[in-house]
């Protein structure tokens, strides 16, 4: 008996609404690629996807070995993404979406190929390395009628979503200032074998390094948490670590569209910092702070009241939009892997609904579409424009 699709989320994020998992392909992300592991594990844990095909490396032998590691059938393991797109589009059981986790400069070309083949695209950030490429990709997704999603995982933490809900409810009143840090240390030494050298190569990443790599995460977290966007910014680029052609540190001042000031500090050359993404939002009634290294706690400080610490879990002040992202009781830790799974769940439900011709209720799930990806590209481009002009204010 055919199961009636359930898009109400009454059974939770990790139950496929179509009664089957969607078929997913991968380009890039094979053996030895850390980002590919995050994407793959998120897709598997989400319960929404079967990884059915891949062009996991441009090296044919590595592609073959990686496909075997992932349980991909030999006839669906490809050494070339063009061959993969054509072969999968021709199959009755072909992939319905593809995840692209390759170096930045290749994103636009690969994504365009799959969109034209009728395959939805899930793209690692930054979406492209130029605004022109990004705008063309968004236009192509609209023309082909396909979903274009960009993978910013941090807002898919339950407590990041809780912060968003409380701010939009007006718990802290009108937002008056925002501070976001994303602080790492791997770029302090001249070389770090754990991080791909291409992250510092202008031919691959474009005009920014740390700003495009982690600064886009910081700005996106500000955008989705507060609902505000920057109208202008001023960026100072620095090289505080090992030898590099591009910045490893940036100090960015922003003017938000409600005239509030904001500040973003990103660095990959601050010894003792592993992955310190922190956001603090202050309004007329109080402040909210969240730290992705301590992701299960949200600190809410209202004027003339004790600071409240809200713990991830069910009930006890959790808002419905955040509680949907909770999978375990309090005391049983959830962290970045669960955020990636939530991301792939919310994208999967969106794609399932799109392919079924169903309009999801507004706010039922959230994901970053091509427009959000293009905002990230505009942000990093404006930062480069400002820094190269002597750290002047520029409009976005």
Image: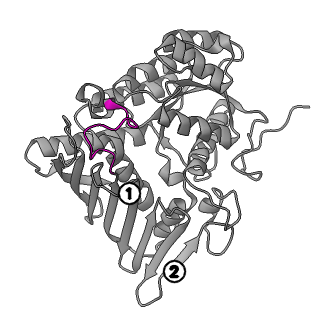
Q: Which of 32/48 is in front?
A: 32
First-in-chain label (1 vs 2): 1
Residue 135 appears anywhere in the view: no
> Residue 106 lies in magenta, yes or no?
no
Q: Where does the magenta region start and end?
A: 185-197
**Residue 77 position (above or below residue 302):** above
The image shows residue 241 at horizontal and vertical percentages of 22, 46
> Residue 191 lies in magenta, yes or no?
yes
Q: Which of 117/109 is in front?
A: 109
Q: CA distance from mark 1 to mark 2?
A: 21 Å
Q: Mark 1 = which residue?
A: 222
Measuring 32% from the left and 50% from the top, which residue is drawn there?
A: 185
272 relative position to 120: left or right: left
**Residue 347 position (above or below residue 178):** above
Circles 1 and 2: CB distance less than 8 Å? no
Measuring 39% from the left and 57% from the top, which residue is drawn there?
A: 276
Q: Main secondary structure of the magenta part?
A: loop
Residue 325 falls in image quadrant: bottom right
Residue 140 falls in image quadrant: top left
Q: Which of 365/106 is in front?
A: 106
Residue 367 appears anywhere in the view: yes
163 relative position to 246: left or right: right
Say which mark, if any, is on residue 308.
2
The image shows residue 33 at horizontal and vertical percentages of 48, 31
Residue 321 falls in image quadrant: bottom right
**Residue 22 position (above or below residue 12):** above
């Amino acid at each position: 008996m055919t199961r009636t699709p359930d898009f109400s989320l009454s059974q939770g994020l990790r139950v496929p609404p179509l009664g089957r998992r969607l078929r997913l392909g991968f380009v890039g992300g094979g053996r030895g690629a850390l980002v590919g592991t995050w994407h793959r594990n998120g897709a598997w844990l989400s319960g929404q996807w079967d990884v059915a095909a891949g062009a996991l490396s441009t090296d044919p032998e590595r592609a073959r070995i990686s496909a075997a590691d992932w349980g991909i059938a030999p006839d669906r393991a490809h050494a070339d993404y063009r061959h993969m797109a054509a072969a999968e589009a021709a199959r009755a059981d072909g992939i319905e979406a593809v995840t692209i986790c390759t170096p930045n400069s290749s994103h636009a070309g690969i994504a365009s190929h799959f969109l034209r083949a009728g395959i939805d695209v899930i793209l690692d950030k930054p979406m492209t390395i130029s605004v022109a490429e990004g705008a063309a990709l968004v236009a192509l997704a609209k023309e082909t009628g396909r979903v274009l999603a960009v993978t910013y995982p941090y807002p898919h933490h339950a407590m990041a979503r809780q912060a968003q809900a409380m701010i939009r409810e007006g718990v802290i009143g009108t937002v008056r200032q925002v501070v976001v840090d994303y602080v790492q240390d791997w770029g302090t030494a001249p070389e770090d074998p754990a991080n791909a050298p291409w992250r510092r190569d202008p031919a691959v990443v474009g005009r920014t390094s740390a700003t495009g790599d982690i600064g886009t995460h910081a700005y996106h977290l500000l955008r989705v948490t507060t609902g505000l966007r920057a109208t202008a910014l001023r960026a100072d680029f620095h090289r505080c670590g090992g030898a590099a052609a591009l910045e490893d540190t940036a100090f960015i001042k922003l003017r938000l569209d409600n005239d509030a000031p904001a500040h973003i500090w990103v660095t990959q050359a601050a010894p003792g910092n592993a992955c310190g993404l922190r956001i603090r939002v202050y309004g007329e009634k109080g402040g909210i702070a969240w730290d992705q290294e301590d992701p299960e706690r949200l600190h809410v400080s209202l004027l003339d009241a004790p600071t409240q610490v809200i713990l991830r879990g069910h009930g006890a002040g959790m808002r419905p939009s955040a509680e949907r992202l909770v999978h375990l009781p309090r005391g049983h830790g959830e962290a970045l892997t669960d955020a990636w799974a939530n991301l792939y769940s919310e994208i999967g439900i969106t794609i399932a609904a799109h392919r079924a011709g169903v309009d999801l209720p507004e706010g039922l799930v959230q994901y970053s579409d091509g427009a959000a990806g293009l905002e990230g590209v505009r942000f990093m481009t404006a930062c480069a424009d400002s820094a190269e002009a002597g750290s002047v204010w520029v409009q976005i």
